[in-house]
Image (cartoon, grey):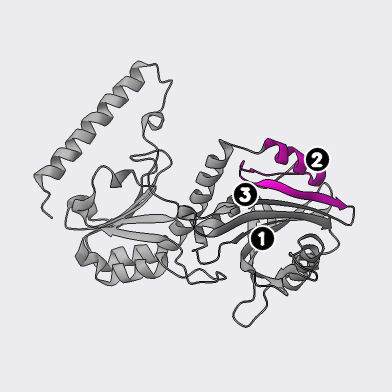
C-alpha cells in the first residue's frame, strides 16, 4: 500500500518525539517512565476504533469483527451493542485518533515483516491506559483465523480495562464516609464515588443491607437518571445458595424488605418473563469462586424498571455470602454505560478481613 508523504511526516515526527522523550527520561536517571509523559487516553467509555482498509472491512474480516464487537447485550430493556464501533482507513490514523482508549489495527499486505501472521500488543502506545492490538499478515484467510481465535478474549480484556478506568476515575473523588460505614457494617470495601449517597445501612445477623444511590438527570438534563448499588450479606449454609433460583428468591426477599416504592404494596422485584429471565455466570473473582447474575428489575404494582447485575461470593472469614448489585433507572435513555459505571463499584469489592 502506498503511504502518503503526509503520513510519512507524521510518523517521522512521532519517532523523533519519542526519541527525545527517551533521552530526557534517561538523562533524569531513569526516575520516570515514558508512560508518565504520555497524554491520557481519549474517547468515551466502551468505544472501540478499528483501523483497516475498506476492502478488508467490507469482506469476511469486517463482517466477523462487527458481529463480535456490536453483538447485542442481553438483559437490557432496549437493544444495545456491546461496544460503540468506529472504523477508519489506515490513512485516518491521525494524531487525535491514535490516542484513543481502545484500538484494533488489521493490516494485510505483502511486506516481509508480515510473512508470519501475528497479533502484536502495544499497550500505552500513544496514551496512558491505552489498549492497542495489531493483527498483521499477508493472507486474508490466515488473519481471519487468527482473529477468530483471539478477538473474543481481547474484547473481554477491553471490557475489564474499561472497569479499571472507571474505578481510577472514581478513586480521584471518593465518598470516604460511606466507604467507612460499609466497612464497619458489612466488612466490605468498595470504591464508592462521591456522587453515590448512602440511603440506608442496616441489618442483623440474619442479613445486613446497604443502599447507595445517585439521583439526577441524564445528558442535556432532560431525562431522569438514577444509578445505584445494593450490598447485602447473609449466613452461608450450603453451595445451593449459589444457584440461580436461590439468588433470585433471596434478592426478591431483600428488596421487598428494604426498597419500597412510593405507594403502599410497592417494591422492587426481579422481572421474570419469557425471554427476560436473569442469566447466571460462574466466574473467578480475585481467586475466589463467584457468580454473576444479570437481568432486569421491575416495580411491583408500579411502572419502574431497568437492568441490574450482581456479584455474589463468600467471605470465608465470616462464613457469609456477600452480594453487591448494580442497577440503573434511565427511562428513554440508553443504559449500557450507566449500568457499566456501577459495575465498576461492584467489581471493586474487597473484604475487610
* Image x and y of residue 346, in percent: 64, 52
Residue on which the image places disc 3? 345
Q: Residue 77: where, in percent of width, then height?
A: 55, 71
User: What residue is disc 1 on?
Assistant: 310
Depth check, front residue: 306 or 139:
306
Q: Along the polypeptide, which appears first: circle 2 or circle 1?
A: 2
Q: Residue at x 54, y 54 (%)?
A: 217
The Cα–Cα distance between marks 2 and 3, rounded to whole angstroms, is: 18 Å
Which residue is painted at 14% across and 42% down in the image?
Answer: 8
Q: Picture coordinates of residue 344 (x, y %)? A: 58, 50
Provide residue 119's location: percent of width, then percent of height. 34, 54
Which segment did they paint magenta? 176-204
Give the mark nearest the N terminus, 2 or 3. Answer: 2
Q: Give the Cα distance between marks 2 and 1.
A: 21 Å
Q: Which residue is mark 2?
A: 184
Camera-side residue of 194 and 108: 194
Classify mark 1: helix, strand or loop: strand
From the image, which quarter does the N terminus lie in? bottom left
Amino acid at each position: 500500500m502506498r503511504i502518503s508523504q503526509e503520513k510519512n511526516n507524521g510518523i517521522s515526527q512521532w519517532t523523533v518525539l519519542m526519541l527525545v522523550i527517551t533521552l530526557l527520561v534517561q538523562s533524569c536517571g531513569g526516575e520516570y517512565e515514558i508512560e508518565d509523559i504520555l497524554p491520557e487516553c481519549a474517547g468515551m467509555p466502551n468505544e472501540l476504533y478499528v483501523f483497516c482498509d475498506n476492502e478488508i472491512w467490507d469482506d469476511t474480516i469486517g463482517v466477523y469483527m462487527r458481529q463480535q464487537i456490536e453483538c447485542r447485550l442481553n438483559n437490557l430493556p432496549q437493544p444495545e451493542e456491546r461496544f460503540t464501533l468506529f472504523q477508519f482507513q489506515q490513512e485516518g490514523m491521525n494524531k487525535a485518533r491514535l490516542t484513543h482508549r481502545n484500538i484494533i489495527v488489521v493490516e494485510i499486505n505483502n511486506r516481509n515483516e508480515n510473512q508470519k501472521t501475528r497479533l502484536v500488543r502495544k499497550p500505552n502506545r500513544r496514551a496512558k491506559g491505552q489498549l492497542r492490538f495489531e493483527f498483521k499478515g499477508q493472507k486474508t484467510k490466515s488473519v481471519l483465523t487468527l482473529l477468530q481465535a483471539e478477538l473474543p478474549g481481547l474484547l473481554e480484556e477491553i471490557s475489564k480495562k474499561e472497569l479499571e478506568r472507571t474505578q481510577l476515575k472514581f478513586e480521584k473523588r471518593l465518598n470516604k464516609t460511606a466507604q467507612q460505614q460499609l466497612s464497619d457494617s458489612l466488612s466490605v470495601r468498595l470504591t464508592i464515588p462521591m456522587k453515590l449517597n448512602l440511603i440506608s445501612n442496616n441489618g442483623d445477623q440474619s442479613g445486613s443491607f446497604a443502599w447507595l444511590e445517585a439521583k439526577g438527570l441524564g445528558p442535556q438534563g432532560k431525562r431522569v437518571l438514577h444509578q445505584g448499588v445494593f450490598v447485602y450479606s447473609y449466613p452461608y449454609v450450603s453451595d445451593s445458595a449459589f444457584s440461580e433460583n436461590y439468588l433470585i428468591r433471596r434478592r426478591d426477599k431483600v428488596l421487598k424488605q428494604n426498597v419500597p416504592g412510593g405507594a403502599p404494596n410497592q417494591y422492587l422485584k426481579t422481572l421474570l418473563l419469557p425471554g427476560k429471565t436473569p442469566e447466571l455466570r460462574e466466574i473467578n473473582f480475585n481467586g475466589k469462586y463467584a457468580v454473576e447474575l444479570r437481568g432486569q428489575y421491575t416495580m411491583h404494582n408500579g411502572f419502574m424498571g431497568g437492568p441490574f447485575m450482581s456479584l455474589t461470593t463468600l467471605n470465608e472469614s465470616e462464613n457469609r455470602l456477600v452480594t453487591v448489585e448494580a442497577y440503573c433507572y434511565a427511562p428513554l435513555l440508553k443504559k449500557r454505560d450507566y449500568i457499566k459505571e456501577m459495575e465498576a463499584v461492584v467489581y471493586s469489592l474487597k473484604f475487610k478481613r
